[in-house]
Amino acid sequence: MKKLLCLLALLSLIEVTPTVANNSEIDLLYSKIQLDSTRTGALDQYWAKLARTVKEGDFDGYRALYHDDAVVIFAGGATQISVSISQAMESWKSIFDDTKAGKINVDVDFRLSQRIGNDITAHETGIFAFSSLNSDGEVASRSYVHFEMLFVKGDKGWLSLMEYQKSNATQEEWDALQ
């Protein structure tokens, strides 16, 4: 009888051990899902701010979304270069000024195909559509660009550390990311 009780006690421990391991795995998975959801939600807000600042011509707001040491890589055109964010901003400033003054109307939209990260770093891949609008608010021209962004999270929230404009995209590729 004692042997039977010992065997039953041992079997009950064996039965509990996988359950505990599974619960730990489930807790870890749940924690990762919560972290991913928090990160992607915050980065969704980042993309919305980026689009808003472009549309409004808010140069200072746009610049504030990039780390001071950020770089921008342009690889889609004939000239492939990497520049500091300060250099890129110098060339973009007139577009922001003209937009803010109402001389031109522009818009940008983002669609993402991959989102990787943790609580302090992120890498997102997708396509952005940059549009110029006529005086009626209709799209006069639109370009699509494959891009990657590398982010770090600090005291100021999420900041872009690298923007990589890889290559031109097509309308079909854009539509596929809906």
Image: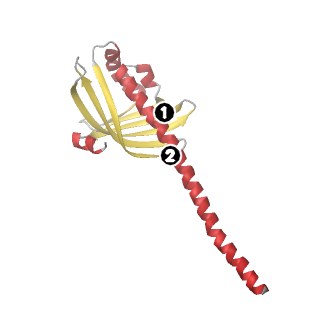
Q: Which of 23 and 152 is in front in this view?
A: 23
Q: How crowded is mark 1: few (under 14 residues within 10 Å), some or many (20 or more)?
A: many
- Residue 51 visible in rendering: yes
Please state the horizontal and vertical placement of residue 116, each as a whole percent of the image.
Answer: 45, 47
The secondary structure type at the circle numbered 1 is: strand
Q: Which of 69 and 105 is in front in this view?
A: 105
Q: Which residue is drawn at 78% across and 87% down?
A: 1
Q: Which of 31 and 125 is in front in this view?
A: 31
Q: In this view, does 160 lie above or below 107?
A: below
Q: Residue at x 71, y 80 (%)?
A: 8
Q: Which residue is drawn at 37% across and 43% down?
A: 125
Q: Earlier in the sequence, mark 1 or mark 2?
A: 2
Please state the horizontal and vertical placement of residue 9, each as a whole percent of the image.
Answer: 73, 77
The image's colouring method is: secondary structure
Q: Looking at the picture, which amino acid does disc 1 mark?
A: Leu
Residue 23 quadrant = bottom right
Q: Mark 1 points at which residue?
A: 159
Q: Alpha carbon of mark 1 to alpha carbon of mark 2: how far? A: 17 Å
- Residue 79 visible in rendering: no
Q: Is residue 17 above or below residue 145?
A: below
- Residue 36's mark? 2
Q: Nearer the viewer, residue 23 or 145?
A: 23
The secondary structure type at the circle numbered 2 is: helix
Please state the horizontal and vertical placement of residue 53, each as a whole percent of the image.
Answer: 40, 23
